[in-house]
């Protein structure tokens, strides 16, 4: 199958047609940098922190952000988190440190063991014994967020860059709809809502319109590290099923995922307005919906005796 732009062998078929390696790399970078510009994810004055797990998405966004930061003479640093998973954490942290060395980017590595006294596996063992009813996916993601908040603030970041991609956003949005939690979508979009005083530093997502398969291919072509598909916090309890169905729709009707997020963006102002009007039901720590003071996850973290709760 030839590339539509030069007739070389295509490596991927996009909505507009097949692309060769060279034109795909240009297309991917243009899409990511275009998202930064269009949605004003950050300015030259911002001090940037990249939350880097060491997987394909965070490595790709770290590489793209470091290239742009060099060009703009902008300060950027990465925070890598070691959750203590056997073999996998070491590989992922190695990816982060090697890429930071290659790009000349400052890097901070922190671990669950040092910060919380336990690895994620040990914490899950404690959670099961206490019958807290929290999944590894949910607990690990929440603890990572605590550490990203802590170290991005410690080193003066004004924006936190994450590797969330198109697939992540569509999956999470559909899960919120199916679960009757549409108010959670208030935190979505290429740029999160403006930070409240004393709250988390705003998250931004340059890969918002980049699919998971595109990101994986880009990371492979740019030789960004040893890639592993499963994320640091494991698999979402229902996310795989939803993601598979969305992938089926995308194969049948190309552009489905992009259509979903564009509709989300149209709805986002009204969702955020409704969410803002329900401040009384927010978790006191993380700001997400909660029945009484703290959400289920922050309550579980409190009962584990870890974190600033």
Image: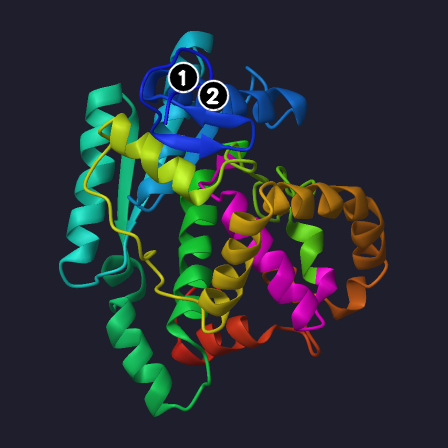
* Image spot of residue 224 (x, y percent): 25, 31
Q: Which residue does the image show at 19% across and 56% down from the upper left?
A: 88
For the residue pair 176 and 275, the one nearer the viewer reads as 176
* Image spot of residue 89 (x, y percent): 21, 54
Q: In whole angstroms, how far apart are the C-alphas of marks 2 and 1?
A: 6 Å
- Disc 2 secondary structure class: helix
Q: Is residue 201 left or right of residue 99?
A: right
Mark 2 touches mark 1? (CB < 8 Å):
yes
Q: How many C-alpha atoms fall within 10 Å of the one at disc 1: few (<14), some, or many (≥20)?
A: some
Residue 251 is a magenta residue: no
Q: Is residue 309 above or below residue 274?
A: below
Q: Which residue does the image show at 45% across and 73% down from the upper left?
A: 237
Q: Which residue does the image show at 65% across and 65% down from the upper left?
A: 176
Magenta stretch: helix, strand or loop mostly = helix
Answer whether residue 128 is visible to the viewer in this image. Answer: yes
Q: Which residues are magenta?
A: 160-183
Q: Which residue is mark 2?
A: 27
Q: Is residue 3 left or right of residue 289?
A: left
Name the quadrant containing residue 296.
Answer: bottom right
Q: Which residue is mark 1?
A: 23
Q: How many C-alpha atoms fall within 10 Å of the one at disc 2: few (<14), some, or many (≥20)?
A: few
* Image spot of residue 205 (x, y percent): 54, 37
Answer whether residue 289 is visible to the viewer in this image. Answer: no
Residue 182 is a magenta residue: yes
Q: Report the label total.
A: 2
Say which mark, if any, is on residue 262. Answer: none
Name the quadrant containing residue 36.
Answer: top right
């Amino acid at each position: 199958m030839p590339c539509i732009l030069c007739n070389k062998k295509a490596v991927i078929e996009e909505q507009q047609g097949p692309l060769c390696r060279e034109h795909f790399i240009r297309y991917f970078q243009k899409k990511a940098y275009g998202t930064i510009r269009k949605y004003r994810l950050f300015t030259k004055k911002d001090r940037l922190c990249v939350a880097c797990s060491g997987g394909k998405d965070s490595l790709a966004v770290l590489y793209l952000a470091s290239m742009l930061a060099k060009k703009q003479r902008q300060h950027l640093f990465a925070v890598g988190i070691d959750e203590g998973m056997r073999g996998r954490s070491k590989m992922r942290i190695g990816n982060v440190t090697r890429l930071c060395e290659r790009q000349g980017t400052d890097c901070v590595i922190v671990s669950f063991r040092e910060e919380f006294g336990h690895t994620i596996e040990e914490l899950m063992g404690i959670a099961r014994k206490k019958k807290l009813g929290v999944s590894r996916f949910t607990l690990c993601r929440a603890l990572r967020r605590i550490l990203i908040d802590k170290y991005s603030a410690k080193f003066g970041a004004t924006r936190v860059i994450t590797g969330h991609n198109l697939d992540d956003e569509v999956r999470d949005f559909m899960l919120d709809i199916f679960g009757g939690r549409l108010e959670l979508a208030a935190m979505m979009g290429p740029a999160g809502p403006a930070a409240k005083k004393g709250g988390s530093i705003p998250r931004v997502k340059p890969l918002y319109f980049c699919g998971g398969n595109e990101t994986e291919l880009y990371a492979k072509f740019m030789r960004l590290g040893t890639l592993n598909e499963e994320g640091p916090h494991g698999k979402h309890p229902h996310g795989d099923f939803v993601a598979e169905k969305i992938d089926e729709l995308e194969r049948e009707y190309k552009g489905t995922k992009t259509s979903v997020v564009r509709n989300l963006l149209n709805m986002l102002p009204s969702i955020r307005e409704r969410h803002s009007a329900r401040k009384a039901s927010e978790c006191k720590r993380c700001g997400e919906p909660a029945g009484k003071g703290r959400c289920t996850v922050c309550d579980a973290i409190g009962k584990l005796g870890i974190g600033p709760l």
